[in-house]
Image: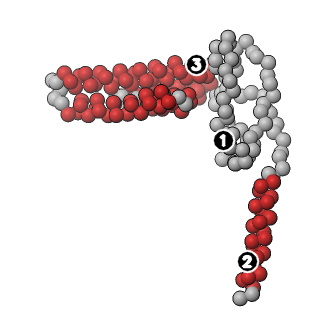
Amino acid sequence: MHGHGAAPPTRTSGTVITLRVLFAIAGFLSCGLLACVPLFRVAMLRGRWADWVLAWISVPLSIGCLAVVGSVPESDPRGDAALATVLILGAVSGAYFVVFDIRHHHGPPPTGTTPPQPSAYAPSQPGYGYPAAAPYPAVPPAPTPPNPYLPGPPSPQPQRPAPARIDQVRAELDELSDYLRRHEDGR
């Protein structure tokens, strides 16, 4: 979409806050029906199996509670309990998302170091996809971690020659094309 070597556009702090608010209120304002949305966002960003399990459990829980609310009479206390459960689920999932998102965007605490995480754009196996982009030059640690959604200094990326594999495939296709033309002319 952005071409080889072009970075996706950066998000401003206003966009980050707007997305944070929308994800946080989605579960509660939909009466718990969309309580899974902030939980799936946390699971995608964090990638831990516990977050995925929590997100997938919230789907049948909210649907089941709303089914109980719709199937019992208004005077039945089970309907009140189910509605309270689904609203609490929506509020807790939103609060969990906000806490995680704030911690995620402010980085790790300054006392500990974390191992580098694999890039989402880097290929998982060597030899497949585009070559990995050159890493940014090391920057001395700042008193506060930089916000990844604020624009930083531009980093020019040098043009790379086409990989040898593409040239090989191109040559093989040319040979195949010549072969097919010769056999087509012979008929």
Above or below — where is 180 with respect to 30? Answer: below
The residue under label 1 is which amino acid type?
Answer: Ser
Residue 124 got which mark? 1
- Give the SS element for disc 2: helix
The residue under label 2 is which amino acid type?
Answer: Leu
Q: Nearer the viewer, residue 27 or 96?
A: 96
Frontmost of labels 2 and 1 is: 1
The residue sitting at 15% across, 23% down in the picture is: 75
The residue sitting at 76% across, 61% down in the picture is: 169
- Give the SS element for disc 3: helix
Q: Quadrant of the C terminus?
A: bottom right
Residue 180 got which mark? 2
The residue under label 3 is which amino acid type?
Answer: Arg
Above or below — where is 67 with respect to 102? Answer: below
Of the image marks 2 and 1, the number of the one nearer the N terminus: 1
The residue sitting at 75% across, 71% down in the picture is: 176
Q: CA distance from mark 2 to mark 1?
A: 36 Å
